[in-house]
Structure formats: structure tokens, C-alpha cells
Amino acid sequence: MGRLAVAAAVAAWAIPLAALVDSIVPDPYMDEIFHIPQVQRYCRRDFLTWDPMITTLPGLYYISIAYVASLFPAAWASRVAEEFDSLCNTALLRSTNVIMAMICGVLVHDLILRIRPELGKRNATAFAILVALYPLHWFFTFLYYTDVASLAAVLAMYLSCLKKQFWLSAVFGACSILLRQTNVIWMIFFAANGAISHAQYLYVKDNVSDENNELTDKSNKEVPDRDNKTTAPGLRRRRNYNPINKREVVSESYRMSSSFTEEIWDIIFKLWNSKYKVLIDFIPFAMVLVVFVAFVIWNGGIVLGAKDAHVVSPHFAQLLYFGLVSAAALLPWHFTPSRVAALFHLCRKNKLYSSFVTLVALGLSLVAVHFFSIAHPYLLADNRHYTFYIWRKVIQVHWMMKYILTPVYVYSWFSIINILGKSQTRVWVLSFVLSVSLVLIPAPLVEFRYYTIPLVILVLHSPVISNGKLLALGFLYAVVDLFTLAMFLFRPFQWQHEPGTQSTPIQHSIPNAKITREKTPRIMNNTELDIKDQLYN
């Protein structure tokens, strides 16, 4: 019932709003001018022609073809190119993401019940609807972008891994990579933590089996009296090692570990103890990873096209931006007086250690914003997306502002790590931070779309808040969603250097522009903007 409620809620707003977007913006827009013609070639069974400006693999196109073919099997089977071309239109292709958004909602619902079953179906439904309303995820439901389908594949991979369906999880991992190459990092993250969890499971299972064998041997030597008290300890020990509760027992023992080093050694011991079983079970992930590495070597990089515009850069400030944006998006968890007081009280417990960690974090953050804050030309030149205004009106309003924000960055990350540490092991938290770093730091462009997957992972592992706060956050998301859509649809404007109307707040880019790293970047003038546009995929 919870799944149906989530899917129905998403469909209730997604379908009519998608029709509204298609009626006002019927033609391919921005990145769509590359994606839609490419998938239409695939609809004509032209799989050999490829637009060199597309950077992602064709996973979304395969999904769309399967979707259209399932709706119109006769047209697909008849191989009438003209008829099927008319079916692969912009509106129908965009509706692929409406279906993907519904699937995302259901997956979030199931993941919540799998990760924290004590929440119940009602809370899982509320969390799933909240994620569906998250502005960055919500907005791209109505355009033909890879974001929504990418999130769906990653969530399906995570859910399958938690269910110990490792082959299926690896298949979804491969699909997620076909949608966006950086998802290989999330596949490794889920596989690594899944291997640790599986090793724990096998270790406890083996111990239970050995214990049962010992008890059986002893009971054979005892008087075969079912009521004999000598069997009671064995029954009690069996009850303590009940396989139903072994996950909770192991998880609790991990959380109670007082030393990170001890936790590491415990993981190594259990992985080594079950090394052959773990290796066999996780071979599918290794196979996908080997194929991906071979692709990167053959391709000469991780992106397919426009490689000059996607140069790997040490953009460490990107990690700080993610912390603040994610904490702000999850406001009731991180920016409340009670939360600030709780973190302050926690720091007071160990003043020396907390002071040292805080100073180190502040120092590294200052270094990151001073030396590794990249001003990408796409960010500086395009006034159709929110990051353009945030960069100009906030970060660059004064030369001191980017340094003033560092304590907020540090606080945001401290709050995120503290919340994750309450439900996850230290190794899990560390691997999450490393995964976020590997996904975001090499990206020279500040783009909030890239934060969606790790933010959803944060939601999945965040503690319960009151229904009032959850409702307030959902209402805030809805206001931002409607404001953004209204700006996009009803407040277009003209550019002198490009025909047609423009809208905010989607990503756009300029071709042949070199990436620069400036302490105080400037805004490009009209002459510099008078260039034929290419899109950042």
C-alpha cells in the first residue's frame, strides 16, 4: 500500500505538470538538443551515429527505446521508420523521466523499510514523497536529462545489495554507469560496504552453526530428557544467537567499538575469515569494474565527448559546497537551535580533541577555498541557472565572503558526519565521505545536480524528525519547486547572441572556453558571450 501511495502521489503532480511543460516548451531545450536527436537516431535503428558533444553513455536512450517500444509494440515491430519517428517525439521521451521519478519514489520507500524497518510504512511513505519533492530531482523530472534515471538505477543497485541479491545489484550498477559514468564510485561504495556486511553475516552464521553442533554433541551424551535443566543454557545461547537478530547484534557491536583501529582490524579479520565466499558472491561487481576500466583506457578518459570542457581538476571547494547545500536542504536535521546546542555540547565533552579537529578542518577549508576554488567559464557566463546568481551575489559579493563561509561549511560537515555516525560504522561514514569526494572534487563546474545522489543517501540514513518538521520541509520544497517552474515557463528572456527564448535555472555552457582558476573571477561581457553555444552534459 505504501508503494502505491508514493507512486500515485508522484504521478498526481508529475503527469499534469509534464503536460504543461510540453505545451509551453515543446521543442528540445538546452541539453535536450543533443539528447533527443540522438535517441531519435536510435529509434530509426541508427546505432552507429554519435553526437561528439554528448559526454554520457547511452543508457537513457536504451531505456527510452524500451519504453516507447512497450507502448507501441506494433510500430516498433513493423520497422516503419516514419511512423516510429513520430512516436519518438520530445513529449513522449520526456515522459520517460516521469516513470523514472515514480520508480525512484518506490525505491526510496523500500530502502527506508530495509534500512530502518522500525519507522513503519507511514514514515517510509512520507520520506519517499519528501525525496520526490526535492527541487533538483523534481525539476528534471520534466526534461530529458539523465539525472532521474541515474538516481533510480543507483537506488535499485543499493536495494538489491542490501537484499544480498549481488548479481542483480551488479546489473543495476552497470545500468547506472551507462547513465552516468561517475556512478561507478557509488557501485564501489555499495559493493565494499556490502562485502563488509556480508562478511559479518557469514561470520555470525558460522559461529551459530558451530555452536549448534557443539550443543548437539553434548545433548547426545546427556540423558535424553527434554525437561533436563542441562539443556537450558544451550537454549539460552541459541536464543542469544538467533539468526533473526544477528544483524542488529553485529551492528550494535560495531557502534559500541571504542577504537577505529579495532573496527578496521575486526573487519579485516571477518573478511579474511570468509574471503572465498565473499569473493565468489561479489565477482559480479568486479566484472563490471574491469569492463569499466577497459572502457576508460580505450576511450582515453571517463567522458565520451567534449573532453576539453571536462578536464579533471582539483576542485576541493566543491566538497565544501556540497556540505552546505545538503545541510541546508535537510534544514530540520542540521540547522536548528537544538542541533547547534547538541553539537556544541558534544564538543565540550572533549575540548582538546574537538578544538584540534575544528582547527584542522577550518585550516583545510581555508586552503580549499583560496587555492582550489575553480571559477568555471560556464558558471560565470550564463544567467539562466541559480548558481550564476549565488556565485555573484553571495560568494563573490566581497573578497572576504568565501573565507567567512568556511565555518558554515565546517559546521555542515560536522553535523552530517555526526548524524551518520549515530546509525553507521566509522568505516561506512569514512567510505561515504571518500565517495562524495571522488565524485565531486574532479568536477570543475559547480552544479547542484551532482549533489542529488549523495543527498538522497543522507536522507535514507537520517534520524526521524517530527511530522510537523517533515511537513514544513515538504511544503518548503513545494514552494521552491513551483517558483522554479514558474520562472522557467513564464519568465523567459532574450539573448542577443542566440535566437529564441531562455529560462532559468538550467545548466548551460560555452564552447572552446578554457577552464580558469581565479581568486576573483569576472563576469563575461556581451562580446565574449557572442559565441555559438554548446551544452554541458
Image (cartoon, helix red, strand yellow):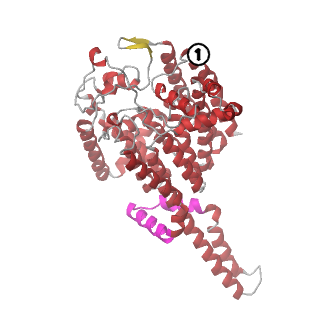
**Residue in front for this viewpoint, 122 or 453:** 453
Q: Main secondary structure of the magenta part?
A: helix
Residue at image point 62% right, 25% down: 82
Q: Within the magenta stretch, is there residue 259?
A: yes
Coordinates of residue 241 in the picture (x, y in percent): 62, 68
In the rendered image, the quadrant that contains the N terminus is: top right
Magenta region: 246-275
Kind of residue indicated by mark 1: Ser
Residue at image point 35% right, 33% down: 445
Label 1: which secondary element: helix
Coordinates of residue 535 in the picture (x, y in percent): 40, 27
Coordinates of residue 55 in the picture (x, y in percent): 42, 36
In the rendered image, the quadrant that contains the C terminus is: top left
Q: Is residue 5 above or below residue 18?
A: below
Q: Quadrant of residue 243?
A: bottom right
Q: Within the magenta stretch, is there residue 223?
A: no
